[in-house]
Image: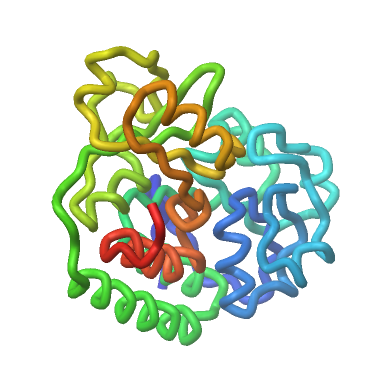
Amino acid sequence: MPFIDAVGRTHPAAPGARIVSLVPSITELLCDLGLSAQIVGRTGFCVHPAHVVPGIAKVGGTKDVNLEKIRRLAPTHVIVNIDENEKPTADALDQFVPNVVVTHPLAPRDNLALARLMGGIFCAGDRAEAWCASFEAEYAALRAAPKGPPQTVLYCIWQDPWMAVSSDTYIARMLAEIGWRVPALGTARYPRFDWSDALVAGIDAVLLSTEPYRFTQPHADALERQIGKPVHLVDGEMMSWYGSRSVAGLRYLRGLADGTLPL
């Protein structure tokens, strides 16, 4: 049976596929589905599983992909993501790769369809269903967990310029699972912003993500002194990596919600 990706393309089951993954979180998922031997290329940001990825050829970054390296690897499938990879890259890959698989999870439960898509195309359906069962169990535990009062939190992903996430993102929908919302900062999915009295007055706290910008605790301490509102460092992988890491991400959210993780 064919499997349908995020842009409506159908992909038949492909036993023995040669895969290049340009999406770090999906590289990890493929490995967890038992497909590591079929991954012939990955980005330099594909760092999980740490004991597997050093043996897979690098083909550049998520934004600066080396198309010639991919061409030499002769993949049958390249996996891309609408947020992480550039459309011109995907268009160029279409010219010489038989199957460009486009992904775009936007909410936690989209991980189920993602796992089944990967498992279906690459003939690892049983492993995908087992993974989905683990996800469903962790999701049910999150939904049943006690939660504090709703909050408005500014989730920052960059500085110089300052950038945050909008409500139309996977991160914001993760936060929504525990009753936290992000402020509206315009129409961009990842808006730039300037600190203003009105912005600070409208939020309860700031969350600084450890990726893609490498915010650290000194950043959080300095910003808290500047704006006079609580500023917390959060694990960017737990909040933004779909695929395999999303199960741990749900557990991480539960810790934020019930206060067992320090904020």
Q: Residue at x 22, y 41 (%)?
A: 181
Q: Position of residue 110 (x, y in %)?
A: 33, 59
The answer to whether residue 208 is above or below residue 118 is above
Residue 90 in view: no
In the picture, residue 166 is in which quadrant? top left
Q: Quadrant of the N terminus?
A: bottom left
The answer to whether residue 195 is above or below residue 168 is above
Asked whether 168 or 160 is in front, the reply is: 160
Q: Position of residue 196 (x, y in %)?
A: 31, 13
Q: Residue at x 23, y 47 (%)?
A: 180
Q: Position of residue 214 (x, y in %)?
A: 61, 39
Relative to 1, 87 lies left or right? right
- Colouring scheme, one of rainbow, by chain, secondary structure, one colour: rainbow
Q: Residue furthest left?
A: 149
Q: Position of residue 27 (x, y in %)?
A: 62, 61
Q: Residue at x 63, y 57 (%)?
A: 77
Relative to 192, 214 lies left or right? right
